[in-house]
Image (cartoon, coloured by chain):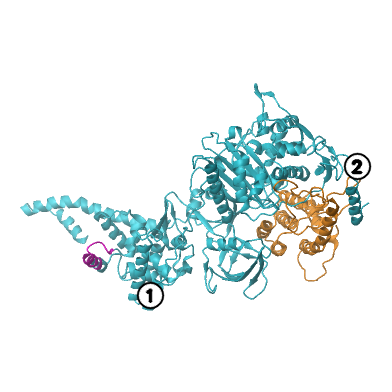
Amino acid sequence: MSRGTNSPCDGSTTGPAALTSLRVAVRNLKLLSGLGALLVLAACAPMQSQPPAPVVVPSPPTTGPGAPPAPTTPVPAPEVRPVPRPTPPLPPRVVPPPVAPDAVSALLQQASSEAQAGRHDAAIALGERAQRLDPRAPEVYLVLGRARLARGQPAEARQLALKGLALSVTGTEVRQELEALLRDTGS
Amino acid sequence: MARRRQRKSRTRNPPRRSPWAVVRVVLGALLLPVVIAAGLGVIALDTMVKAKFSGAKWALPAHVYGRPLELYAGQPLARAALLRELDGLGYRKAAQAEHPGQFRISGNSLDIHVRAFRFPDGEQPAQRARVSLDATGIAAITSSSGAALPLLRLEPVRIGGIYPEHAEDRVLLRLAELPPYLDDALIATEDRDFYRHHGVSARAILRAFWANLRAGGIAQGGSTLTQQLVKNLYLSQNRTLARKVMEAVMAMLLELHYSKQEILEAYLNEIHLGQAGGRAIHGFGLASEFYFRQPLAELDLHQVALLVGLAKGASHYNPRRHPERALARRNLVLAQLAEEGVIDAERARVAARQPLDVTDAPGGVNQYPDYMDLIRRSLQADYKATDLTANGLRIFTHFNPQAQRQVEVAIADTLRHIEAERKLKPGRIQAAAVVVGVGTGEVLALAGSRSGQVAGFNRALDARRTIGSTAKPAVYLAALEQPGRYTLGTLVDDAPVSIVSGGKPWTPENFDRTSHGPVPLYVALSRSYNQATARLGLEVGVDRVADVVRRLGYEGPLLKVPALLLGGVSMTPFEVAEMYHTIAADGFHTDLRAIASVSGADREILRRYPFAVEQHFAAAPMHLLHYALRKVMTEGTGTNAYRQLPAGLTVAGKTGTSNDQRDSWFAGFSGNYLVVVWLGHDDNSPMAVSGASGALRAWSAIMAGLDNRSLPDVNPEGVTYAWYDPVTGAGSGAGCANARQLPYINGSEPEGRSCLSGVPGQMLDRVRGWLGID
């Protein structure tokens, strides 16, 4: 997964790196979803006689009344990473599409400027508005954690960093920044 | 007074012994106490008038607000839901959304003129925006200048206030905030001489007397606005002569101390304009919310006239109960306004043709007593009662009116159906439910009874009931935290268990009274086998399981006995919600919060309740537990949920039934909502409804109406999916009969086995080839 190292290079983004990486992620998602769809089709085609094989998506409801005909949401992009043999590389890790990326990044950008101006409570309030829209966005916890650290609450900041790390993907910029935050909390 | 004093002094003159003098002495002796009493009385009244008027004149209840709805492009918000939100906020459909509080529908878009609102993070000015909708929700939001808006925040609905014991409520109003005509209409109708009299008006009394004589009954009162204010502020509604005299004296005293403007402002805030159950609606500010769900400043002439008309008798002219009377009264007010020359006759005629425009459901009153109860309790730790009931605090909460409505409707419908199908006595089964935002830990809705509108025993917070199988995830989590010993595929024997616990035999049985032999862990949980769970739990150890229950967030009493393994512990639905939220949030514990922040009447934020988390479980075992709880919904005891939920929605959850079916539980979550439902009898008698047939059904009905997102398909680092054969409990190969993939904590996965059929293997090689992996 190398999207974190892709350069956005459009010159218009002045926000923090995490937001930039979020935006890049969204853009790349569209590209990657094409590959994801291809994978699903190719992988499932020869196994039609079997129950829906969870090759890419780890655990869709496979039997019972809950069995979906097909996922209606866009197929998320798989993260491809080598898995030690003999375990088959199944299923790859899948990142869900971000919810409301524009609204979330607008709020987080505002939060960052509040934080830069030293208004950390305001930054937290804005970060929480973003969290309400997408509680799985790791960037949210980066912003909340940094604000807590700046307020002199390293223990809270540390837990927020852990939460963000649990939701982020290896190799992304936000991941690195969360790791840095975790270090800054003194552990 | 002067004359009395003169007389008094005369009685003290040296007596001249004439018969007149005797009469005078006797009279004087009789009058003296009366005079002194009257004098003292006036002084007492004066003190009372001043104390009440200038002191805590208007004890301002704390105003409680729900969450503001944030709109954004791409939001899967149904048009109906958006319209419901606007309706709840009292927005009116208008040809042009010219004024705040109005909206216009044109084709697939809504022009909303959002009201200004003082948010804790600052004043948000009124703004006009266009929300374009398509089949999936909001397609775009643009400002009036056509620029795309990333977000549009509506103001939160005021869900109630926190009142002192005498249960008054008001929305404080300043003269500067009045809508046009309100004070004119009031003076024209109630007290034409208001600016001329000194508290009492002889002309008004005469005019009323004359009018009443002509009408042959009481048609008009002769009370001035000042007298009416006195009556509202200080006196009961008794119509005795003594009361009338006191009222007149106090009115004069009030006029002596305060200006006409102060008295008018007091009147506008004090006058009784309606009744909501046990709570009095005081003042025009709250009355506007109560009858129209609109802020007073937005009211049109015909609405203002209706409120003014109510001053004469809020219950007699109650527009919801007696619309004809109210209409006649309103039109009389309009006619008087025209007569006084405040408006022209044509304007009055147009206004008189308007409907009453009163909303069906009252606004601004505590419609959500159970959630308000939670707010009150959360605040008690930080605030004194007088802070809450007198200082006009503004309390911002996470309450979601749409989720609450969904909970109330779903519970009422489900219980009605269950009672009808099973021919049960209606109304006996009770219910409680909690809705929490997954990840944020915010309490969005709460029901403490089957009818959410009635205040009473709040079962969501106070009913401690046996949680039954709802406790089982703790047993499996305790096992899965030891990947060296247990995986989801580990076979556990579902054979009868019998041990001695506390000197008594403990012999749990399965719900279907049969044993199922060796079953994989995830099957034992998804099908809620008691024998297998008891055996597993005893193996893992009760202490370890109790520790997991604590780490999930439960702080109440807990006995470390084997019965705990099968849910022999009593919890409130709120406590169960907190535990399940830790599961839903991937092992991160958060205190469930209802309040976002508290602001003072003078704007500044007094207290925040920020989001905080603590990781209590590693991501990997929690992911394995999620897998099993998803299987509950697709293969286990929760499959009936999909009678109501869309097939493509991935959810996870667990049923719970206590002994003899005294309690029926379901706790489950989607990607964004966690809902816990409890059903049972208040007297704890059996009710013949299991978790799967009762609470699950209500849970599904609630979920079906929420804007759910599927649980994400993300496996955390440290987890590997591997092929597994549930029959043998051993590893398997892709394409083998019965083979399925299970998540394993790295290093605990079984040895893969080659499969007879070679096709899937080749397939795998091809996939590897594409991915550049050998």
Mark 2 or 1: in front is: 2
Q: Amino acid at mark 1?
A: Arg
Start and end of the magenta stretch? B207-222
SS category of the residue bearing label 1: helix
Q: Is residue B500 magenta?
A: no
In the rendered image, which residue does mark 1 sit on? B349
Q: Residue lying farthest top?
A: B503
Q: Quadrant of the N terminus of chain B?
A: bottom left
Total numbered labels placed on residues in the image:
2
B714 and B175: which one is in front?
B714
Say left or right for B116 vs A10.
left
**Which chain did the renderer colour orange?**
A
In the rendered image, which residue does mark 2 sit on? B754
Q: Residue lying farthest left?
A: B18
Drawing shade for chain B: cyan
Residue B15: x %, y % from top left: 10, 52
B645 and B137: which one is in front?
B645
Q: Is residue B210 magenta?
A: yes
Q: Against B524, is B125 above or below?
A: below
Q: CA distance from mark 2 to mark 1?
A: 90 Å
